[in-house]
Amino acid sequence: MKKIFLALTIAAVGLSLSSCGDSKKKDTPEVTTTEEVAAPKEGFEVSISGNDAMQFDKTEIRVPVGETIILTLTHSGKMDKTVMGHNFVVLKTGVDVAAFAEKAAVASDSDYIPQSELNSIIAHTKTIGGGETTTIEFKITEAGTYPFMCTFPAHYALMKGEIIAE
Ligand code: CO
């Protein structure tokens, strides 16, 4: 969220600078309403973190059906993403989770997201390493229980849980 905020603020400053050269705009305020431009996104915020011991800090996440979910994954450890990478992948109901995890674990060329199984995925983050954070937005449009996991090789054994949409 902070990164988005900063980027929008910079964009607003850029706009006001470029309008300086335009003499017609003298009577309008120099600075556009930064607050309006950088208004926080609306949505249901969720955070989850993974550590160097291959664990998520949550195994169950409750979310409202149909609302935008703003999910932030943080890697609270120090290890590099090549040895202790974490991502957050939400699957549709009915997917064979173990089979999916097996295919994902060998999908190193596509950041551990198996391109043959995209139909099984509702949402996913990128893979991050120690100290990093990433945010995604998605919606779940039907009430139910949805599996989530980290698809880094072997992490599925410990790093998994359920999203309950209600
Ligand atoms: Co992981």
Image: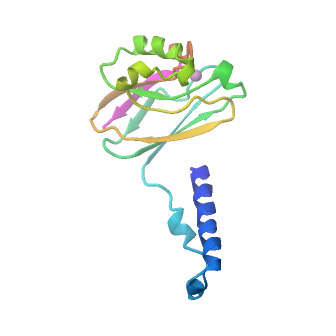
Give the answer, above or below, for where 20 lies relative to 140.
below
Give the answer, above or below, for where 154 lies relative to 89.
above
Q: Residue at x 52, y 17 (%)?
A: 107
Q: Is residue 76 left or right of residue 121?
A: right
Residue sitting farthest toward the right? 78
Quadrant assignment, res 35: bottom right
Judge whether residue 150 is colored magenta: no
Picture coordinates of residue 64 (x, y %)?
34, 42
Q: Residue at x 39, y 46 (%)?
A: 68
Q: Residue at x 44, y 22 (%)?
A: 115
Assign ligand 1 to one image quadrant: top right
Q: How many marks?
A: 0
Picture coordinates of residue 135 (x, y %)?
53, 41
Q: Is residue 137 left or right of residue 11?
A: left
Quadrant assignment, res 97: top left
Picture coordinates of residue 13 (x, y %)?
63, 67
Residue sitting farthest toward the bottom? 27
Question: Which of the pair 130/64 is nearer the observer?
Answer: 130
Quadrant assignment, res 132: top right
Region rendered in magenta = 159-166
- Image quarter where the C terminus lies is top left
Q: Residue at x 36, y 32 (%)?
A: 164
Picture coordinates of residue 20 (x, y %)?
64, 78
Give the answer, above or below, for where 41 lies relative to 30.
above
What colour-coding does the image apply?
rainbow
Residue sitting farthest toward the left? 142
Q: Main secondary structure of the magenta part?
A: strand
